[in-house]
Image (cartoon, helix red, strand yellow):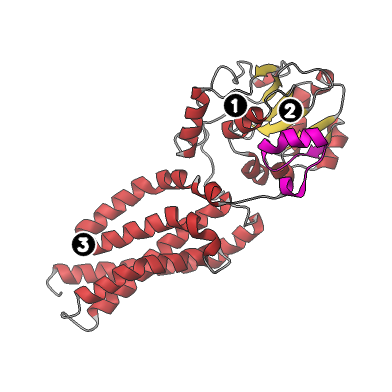
């Protein structure tokens, strides 16, 4: 993702947190498929970006139910939402959960960062002495972890083969029953609910700097400019993920520029109307300044969503950042300069 996770820790429910450190994680700890109120509260805080990097389960080996040496081994990240999604989907299943140290990052993002990767997987197999716990040599990994794991190297170094389960943990029971994933299980979705759930953490991330900036705009440039800024922020964090599939461009930045310009249009029109009698150039100049700054703000916020969607790739995101960052910065700075100059002109009585 664009923003790296923080590296703090929080306490976890006693049902899932091991008290052993990594040097003793060969001792499997019991887990349960039941999610407690504490677990759900942890999920709520994670969704709202509270203690962003602290939602972690202890890496190591866990038992679920009453496993035998023949029971399956499921691999996941130590991000609590990933860990809890896995264990809560395996109600009635006896098995082992091998939790990798992804530094509190979900499977997909950790695979991109390399923490859900070959080295960590092999290291965790060795430190948990998994070969002494199970009689088979098969690991079931989440499909979204595939970019970080070289299956052939895992087998060469550990003797364990890698099998990729379905995209969603909730499909695991059906997958275990048949031994194969249907095309639907392999398909990554990004529906409205999956997009909306991203909004809170984006809001929390920008709310403080946005509030400060909007207060400054209100007292220096007026209500109309502050209202335009508020619209740009809400459009980039709330409206953008809702409307994402229907915005008719490919790149997230261009989608944001278009949506931001549309959001700023009513305010630009209001600026033209408000200064209609003062000067023929004043209103249109205000309008241009507002459009430039607002569109760039929305585009920058929209770019943050590239790390949360299956519609982009790492190389694609890099290309997009290189392609649009300078344009967005130029638009934003130009718009702010126009607004600042016009605000000074108004303050000295020029409008």
Quadrant where the C terminus sits is bottom left
Q: Quadrant of residue 251?
A: bottom right
Label 2 sits on a secondary structure element that is: helix
Rendered residue at 64%/20% (across/down): 32
> How dense is the environment of label 2, judged by Cα within 10 Å: few (below 14), some, or many (20 and up)?
many
Does residue 28 sit above or below 175 in this rendering? above
Is tag 3's residue or tag 1's residue first in the polypeptide sequence?
1
Q: Is residue 331 magenta?
A: no
Q: CA distance from mark 3 to mark 1?
A: 48 Å
Q: Of callouts 3 and 2, which one flags the residue occurring earlier in the amino acid sequence? A: 2
CA gap between label 3 and label 2 equals 58 Å
Q: Residues within 10 Å of mark 1 (few under 14, many from 20)?
A: many
Above or below for 20 versus 261: above
Magenta span includes 170: yes
Q: Give the residue pinned by disc 3.
A: 222
Give the SS element for disc 1. Answer: loop
Mark 3 surroundings: few (<14), some (14-19) or many (≥20) residues within 10 A: some
Residue position marked by numbered label 2 in the rendering: 124
């Amino acid at each position: 993702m664009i923003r790296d996770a923080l590296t703090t820790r929080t306490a976890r429910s006693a049902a899932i947190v091991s008290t052993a450190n990594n040097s003793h994680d060969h001792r499997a700890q019991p887990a349960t498929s039941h999610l407690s109120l504490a677990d759900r509260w942890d999920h709520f805080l994670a969704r709202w970006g509270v203690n962003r990097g602290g939602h972690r389960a202890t890496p190591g080996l866990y038992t679920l139910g009453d496993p035998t040496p023949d029971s399956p081994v499921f691999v996941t990240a130590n991000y609590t939402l990933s860990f809890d999604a896995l264990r809560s989907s395996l109600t009635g299943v006896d098995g082992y959960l091998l939790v990798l140290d992804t530094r509190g990052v979900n499977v997909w993002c950790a695979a991109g960062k390399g923490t859900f990767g070959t080295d960590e997987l092999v290291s965790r197999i060795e430190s948990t002495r998994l070969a002494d716990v199970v009689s088979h040599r098969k690991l079931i990994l989440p499909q979204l972890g595939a970019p970080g794991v070289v299956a052939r190297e895992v087998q060469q170094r550990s003797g364990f083969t890698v099998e990729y389960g379905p995209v969603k943990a909730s499909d695991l029971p059906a997958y275990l029953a048949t031994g194969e994933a249907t095309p639907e299980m392999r398909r990554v979705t990004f529906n409205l609910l999956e997009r909306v759930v991203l909004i809170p953490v984006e809001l929390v991330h920008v709310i403080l700097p946005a509030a400060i900036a909007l207060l400054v705009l209100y007292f220096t440039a007026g209500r109309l400019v502050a209202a335009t800024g508020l619209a740009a922020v809400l459009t980039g964090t709330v409206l953008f993920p809702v409307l994402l599939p229907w915005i008719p461009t490919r790149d997230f930045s261009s989608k944001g520029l278009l949506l931001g310009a549309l959001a700023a249009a009513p305010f630009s029109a209001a600026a033209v109307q408000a200064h209609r009698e003062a000067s023929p150039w004043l209103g249109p100049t205000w309008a241009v300044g507002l459009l430039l700054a607002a569109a760039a703000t929305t585009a920058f916020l929209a770019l943050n969503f590239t790390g949360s969607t299956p519609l982009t790739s790492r190389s694609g995101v890099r290309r997009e950042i290189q392609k649009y960052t300078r344009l967005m910065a130029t638009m934003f700075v130009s718009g702010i300069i126009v607004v600042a100059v016009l605000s000074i002109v108004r303050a000295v009585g020029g409008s």
